[in-house]
Image: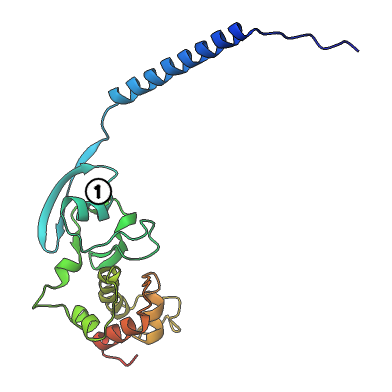
Amino acid sequence: MQSPIPFEISRRDLLISSAATIAITGVSADRTAAQSTTNESPPRSEVSFKVNGESRTLNIDNRTTLLDALREHLHLTGTKKGCDHGQCGACTVIVDGRRINSCLSLALMHEGDEITTIEGLGQPGNLHPMQAAFVQHDGFQCGYCTSGQICSSVAVIEEIKANIPSHVTSDLAAQAKITPAEIRERMSGNICRCGAYSNILDAISEVAGIKA
């Protein structure tokens, strides 16, 4: 068996090698930075839709979500950014009569749509019945999720009236009924970290005209 080939390197050679490596790395980083500064800006497009009854037109980055368009561009901050993953419901708005998680939807997808946020449902002194019911039944504590809860609540009643079934609808051939079980199932995507669920159910039930 052959003995290993001896490998010797002087301190001077090691320092020269290290300096060369650092120099090459620095040149590579400089080139990368130069390329990034010359890259074109992200593509932008124009989108027009109605928000709370008012026609609005925006020129935005194509990657802008509906949530960010509402909050950052139209300054309608009643719609909240919670998880930003479509899991908490704080960003719920109503689009063409149906509720959506605005954090999961690009603004450009809503050309020509009618969008209703919490600001469009009612204002102080002229509250929407659902807003008034939430106040009466103390359907919120910290209030962060409340705008999404209310928008969902309004849409839930309309969903049931439109005979759109849920996972707990027992008879798909009959008109869907507004029941506590239906409300709980349909509102399950809206999380209240304060735990005001029973009061929220009472508020929705009052507006729907049923007993919780």
- Given the current orientation, which residue lies at the most extreme bottom position? 211
The one nearer the camera, 118 or 199, is: 199
Residue 144 image offset from top left, x and y in percent? 28, 68
Residue at image x 36%, y 70%?
190
Residue 192 image offset from top left, x and y in percent? 36, 72
Quickly name the residue at label 1. Answer: 108
Question: Quadrant where the N terminus lies?
Answer: top right
- Mark 1 falls on what kind of element? helix
The answer to whether residue 115 is above or below residue 128 is above
| Circle 1 residues within 10 Å: few <14, some 14–19, many ≥20 | many
Residue 19 image offset from top left, x and y in percent? 51, 12
Colour logic: rainbow
Residue at image x 29%, y 24%?
37
The answer to whether residue 84 is above or below residue 60 is below
Residue 131 image offset from top left, x and y in percent? 20, 78
Question: Quadrant where the C terminus lies?
Answer: bottom left
* Residue 125, picture quadrant: bottom left
